[in-house]
Image (cartoon, rainbow, N blue to C red):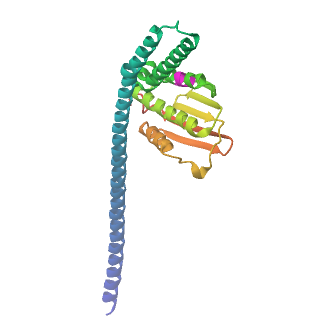
Amino acid sequence: MLKAPTEFIEVFIVITTVLIFCLMIFITIIIHRYQVKQNAYFRNIETLKISHQNTLLQSQLEIQEQTFQNISREIHDSIGQKLTLAKLHLNTLDHSQGNGIAARIMDSVEMITEVINDLSDISKSMNSEIILNNGLIKALEFEASQLLKSGRYAIDFSVSGSPVFLAANSELVLFRIAQEALTNIIKHAEATEIKIRLHYNSNGITLIIEDNGKGFKSTEINFGTGLSNMKKRAGTLNGKLTTHSTPHTCTQIIIEIPLYENNNHV
C-alpha cells in the first residue's frame, strides 16, 4: 500500500532535482551574459575614455603647433627683419674713423649675422609647414646638422629599410617626439655623441635616439614632463615609447609606430 507514495516521492525528487539543475544552468547563463555585457560596457567606457583623452591631446598638439607657427612667423617677419636692418645700418657706418672702431663694427656685424642665421634655423625647426613639406627624413637630417654645427656633439644619423611615408601629420608628431628627446639630451645628458636611427619595415617605423651621456636610474626614469609628453604623443599614433638607461653610460629612447594605422592619421 506504501509503494505508490514512495514512487511519487521519488518522481518528485527527480523532477525537483532536474528543475534545480535547469535553474542553475539558467542562472549560470544569465550571470555569464551579464558579465559579458558588463565587460563590454567597461571596454566601451575605456575606449571612450582613451578616445576622449586622445581628442584632448590632439587639440593640445594642434594648439601647440599653431603657437609654434606664430612664433616662427614672428621670428622670421619681425625679429629677423629688425636684425637685418641693424646689420645694414652697421655696414653703412664710416669704417675710416680708426681701426679699433672699424674692428668693433665688423665684430658686431658678424655677431648679428650669426644671430640671424640661428634664428632662421630655429624658425625652420618650429615651422610645421616646412616639416610637412620636406618629410620626416629631411626634417631629422636638418636637426642632426644643427646639432653637428653647434660643435658640441658627434652625430651619427642613419636610415635603414625602404622608407614608407606616413600621413603628414603623423610624421610631424613623430618629428616633435624626436625634437623633445634631443632637447632632453641637450639639457640633461651631458653627452658628446648622439645617434639617431630611423628604421622602416613592413609593420612600422622604429626611431632610436641614443646618447653617451650620464644616463639615469630606473627610479628617475620619469624626469620632468618631457618623457611623459613623448609617451602621450606616441600614444596618439597608437605607438609606444620605451627607454633604456644606466647611470654614467648612455640613454636609449625607442619609439615604435605602426604603419597600418597611421597612413591616414590626421
Bounds of the magenta segment: 140-144
**Image spot of residue 168 (x, y percent):** 41, 25
In the current view of this chain or complex, which residue is farthest to the front?
A: 97
State the residue at coordinates (57%, 21%).
145
Task: Check the image and report above or below for 151 versus 48.
Answer: above
Q: Is residue 150 magenta?
A: no
Is residue 56 at least partly visible in the picture? yes
Is residue 163 at least partly visible in the picture? no
In the current view of this chain or complex, which residue is farthest to the bottom?
A: 1
* Drawn side of residue 239 relative to residue 198, left or right: left
In the current view of this chain or complex, which residue is farthest to the right?
A: 249
- The quarter of the picture where the C terminus appears is top left
* Drawn side of residue 38 relative to residue 221, left or right: left
Q: Name the magenta segment's main secondary structure.
A: helix
Q: Is residue 141 magenta?
A: yes
Report the number of discs: 0
State the residue at coordinates (35%, 55%).
42
* Drawn side of residue 10 relative to residue 241, left or right: left
Task: Check the image and report above or below for 92 versus 155.
Answer: above
Q: In this rendered view, identify the residue nearer to me: 72 or 171.
A: 72
Residue 8 location, quadrant: bottom left
**Image spot of residue 263 (x, y percent):** 42, 28
Q: In this rendered view, identify the residue nearer to me: 66 or 208.
A: 66
**Image spot of residue 169 (x, y percent):** 40, 28
- The quarter of the picture where the N terminus appears is bottom left
Q: In this rendered view, identify the residue nearer to me: 3 or 88.
A: 88
Residue 104 location, quadrant: top right
State the residue at coordinates (53%, 25%).
143
Task: Check the image and report above or below for 247 versus 178.
Answer: below
